[in-house]
Structure formats: C-alpha cells, structure tokens
Amino acid sequence: MTYRVLIADDEERMRRVISMEFDDMSDVKVVTACNSVTTLGYLDAERFHLLVTDLKVPEMGRLEFLKAIKTKSPDLPIIVLTAYGSVMSAIDAMKEGVFDYITAPFDKDTLKLAVKRALKMSSLTIENKYLRQALESQYDFKNIIGDSLQVVDALSLVGEVAKTDSTVLITGESGTGKELIARALHYNSNRACGPLIVLNCAAIPENLLESELFGYERGAFTSAEKTKRGRFELAGGGTFFLDEISEMSAAIQAKVLRVVEAKELERLGGTETIKVDVRIICATNKNLEDLVKSGKFREDLYYRISVFPITLPPLRERKEDIIPLSKHFLKRFSLKMGKSPITLSREVEKLLLMHKWDGNIRELQNVIERAVILCKGSAILSEHLPTSISKDSCSTENIRLQAAVNPVQFDIPPNGLSLDDLEKQLVTQALEKSKNNKTKAAKLLGLTRGTFRYRLQKYGLAN
C-alpha cells in the first residue's frame, strides 16, 4: 500500500525539510502545497492518508482552515508543525480534530513517530470504513432474496419499522433467516453507525447468561477479578439482537423486562443504576404464546417484546424462492472458491423443488456449498447432492401418484367462484371442526401453523 502525504507550508525551505523526512519511506508519496487554496484543492481532487501543515494561513485563519479541511476529509489525520506554538493554540487545534501538535524546532524522531502513528490510524480508519460499507451493503434489503408473497410482506414490515426504535420480535423456524432480518433492521436504521451486539441465549449456559447480559462488578463472585460491562451496555447507541429469547429462565426474564421497560439495569454485585440507550430485537423458533399459556415465558415480557412481530415462513412454503436462492448461493460460493460460473442442471432444479427443506435456507446453503466443492464441471448434477434429497424426491413423487389415483373431486359452479371466498370458507370450517385449535385446524388443511396464521390474518379471522 502506498500512503499519500500532503505537506502544506508557505515556506519553500520548510516544505523541503519536511519532505526529506519521508525520503527513507518507500511506501510514502509526498505532495506539497504552498497555501490554503492549493491544499483544499488537492483534498477535493484526491484522497490523502496524512496532512502535515504549519497552519500559518493569514487569508482565512488557522482554526477556519482546520474546519475547512475536516469538512472535506473528516477522517484525515492532521499533524500541526509550527514555530508559533502555545498551550492554548494546541488545545484549540486538538478540539478541531488534530492528530498531533509539534512545535519547532522539532526532533526528527518525534516527527517520524507521529507520522507512523498517524498513517497506521489512517489505514485502520479506511479499512474499517470499507468493511462497514461492505457489511451494510450485504444487508441491504435488495440483497435479501425472495419474491414469494410471504417474504414480500415480511420485508414490507421490516422496511416500515427499520427507521424506528420500536422493539421487534422475529419468529420462524431455525434457518429461515431471522438473524439476516435483524441485521438488515440495524443497518437500515438510524442506529446503523452504532454497534450491533448479537447474543444467542441458547448457546450460553444458564449460570453465565445473566453476567453476559448485565455485566458484573469486581468481586461479585469468585472469578470476578475486574468489572465487566454486559451486552446491554456494549450495545449502547446501537442494537441488541437477542436470539432464541425463549431459552431464558424466569429470573433472567424478569431482569430483561426491566431493561425493555425502563432502559436501565444493575450489574451483578452492583448497586448503581445504569441507563442504557439500546434498541432491542428478539427472535425465537418457538411459539411464545403457547409458552406463555404453559407458564414457561412471562406474559408481561412477551407483550413488551412483541410490539412489532414479524413472522418468517419456512422454505417449503415459499417454493418459488428455492431456485433464486440456490443461484444466489451458487454465485457466492463459486466466487469464494475461485471457480468459473456454475449453473444448476434441470434435474437438480426439480430435485431441489421437491425436497422438504426441514433445515430451511441454512440447509439449502449448506447443500449448495457442498455441491460447488464436488462439482468439477460447469453444472451441478444430481450426483453432487446429498442422497437424502433424491430419496425425498422419490417419496414426494409417490405421494403425487397416490393423489392422482384418488384425487379430490370438486366441480366449479357454472357461474364461477372466488378462490379467496372458498379458501376463507375452508379456513373457517377447519376452525370449527378443530374447536378453534389452530394447530389442529392447520393440520386439517395440510398447512403449517405459521401459514395457517397468515391465512387467518389475511381473511380477518385472527383473534
């Protein structure tokens, strides 16, 4: 990497002296400017990693010059090198974001050390900025694959709530993309510049979860040798994503309720009340309503976190998204492994469409990654897929054959009918036959509970 350093000084001799300090730095290219106009012009035209200046700018004033530089290049480190130093001018300069302030006559080693530190910081800043931009673009709504009605509806809800600070509850089976949606919510919110802290409650032992969430004071327990901030505090100014929230004990649920309600907490072993500015997003693959009824989840916490619920459908209920998702993963893994573009054979497309996908999108992603590794040609073939997929397709074909032998008989009336009206009647009948048991009603229609709930909402039958 070549660093570009801009030296701004009104004295030609001083510009030469400073430039000579970079002669032994092969990775540095020096550009010089003699006044503020030229300096600001360079900053408009190209990117620099460091500015060294003496700040003698009679035409606009030193601090005004600094402000103009920071307006054009907010992340540019500035080393002020001047013979007119004073404590007050140094303080004023530092307030405007100056990296270092050195008075002449300066020690060459001191300048070189300051330059190396400034270039290192500049490099890290640029790298972090690039990584953040790449991360944010990855979770742009346009990069979430899905054209099915359920996914479009879910993304519409995500778009509506993203710019707010409302608590969101994302529900869906494992592998449906709950964390992807949570990250999209964060990176498309007003808190995108703040941290995104992720915690899977099911992955942390019960006796450690409380300290991870709320932190602890030194001496709170035997191994607490120093004070530690919890995840709620670390997420301050940003978003805290609590995955699998249903795995919390009742005692921890009570403490989380306080944070959700009052945005405050106490560390373990502490007495100080700490305010936290954090947006909370929760996710679960379980039915929290059923857990509330069985006494395994606090009702008050449930209503606090489900201010804005979003349900993600399983992959088997969005068949039209299987091939686009497969092609998306195919492109990603082909690039990652340095392979030429690979396609899906028609036979493989049929097999993928017939598979049940109990593991949802995560399972599909793993299947495609495996296939790309095994593929030596330009197309994914059935031999590159796990045997479970071909077996699953055989059983699906048998069911189709049985349905062809004993089809459901139904005659369309001469005047036609409304499919929506018919579907609404079937949903209503299923509720009646199951005595309003939604799980049984869904089974009667061959639907999952999530899809059945979607139909209830669609026809205004939810209560």
Image (cartoon, rainbow, N blue to C red):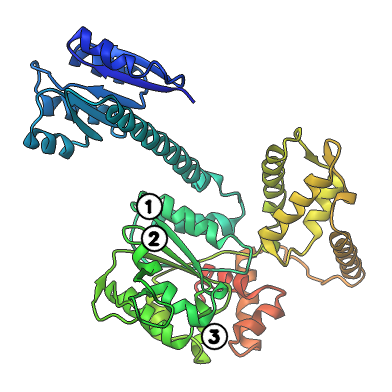
The answer to whether residue 415 of the structure is visible from this angle is no
Number of numbered callouts drawn:
3
Q: Amino acid at mark 2?
A: Thr
Q: Is residue 379 above or below residue 276?
A: above
**Residue 111 vertical position relative to residue 266 in the rendered view, above or below:** above
Side of 177 where 18 appears, left or right: left
**Numbered mark located on residue 11 in the image:** none
Which structural element holds mark 1? loop
Say left or right for 371 vs 74.
Answer: right
Measure the alpha-carbon separation of dots 1 and 3. 31 Å
What is the x, y in percent for residue 97? Answer: 22, 37
The residue mark sitting in front, 3 or 2, is 2
Residue 18, percent from left and from top = 28, 17
* Residue ID for mark 2: 239
Nearer-N-terminus badge (2/1): 1
Name the quadrant containing residue 202. Answer: bottom right
Q: Residue at x 82, y 71 (%)?
A: 409
Which quadrant of the structure image shows residue 451?
A: bottom right
Q: Is residue 224 left or right of residue 376?
A: left
Are the residues flagged by discs 2 and 1 in contact, CB closer than 8 Å?
yes
Mark 3 — residue? 290
Q: Secondary structure at mark 3?
A: helix
Q: Residues within 10 Å of mark 3 (few under 14, many from 20)?
A: few
According to the picture, the residue beneath numbered tag 1 turns out to be: 189
Amino acid at pointer 3: Asp
Front label number (2 vs 1): 2
Circle nearer the N terminus (3, 2): 2
Real-space Cα distance between discs 2 and 1?
9 Å
Tag 2 secondary structure:
strand
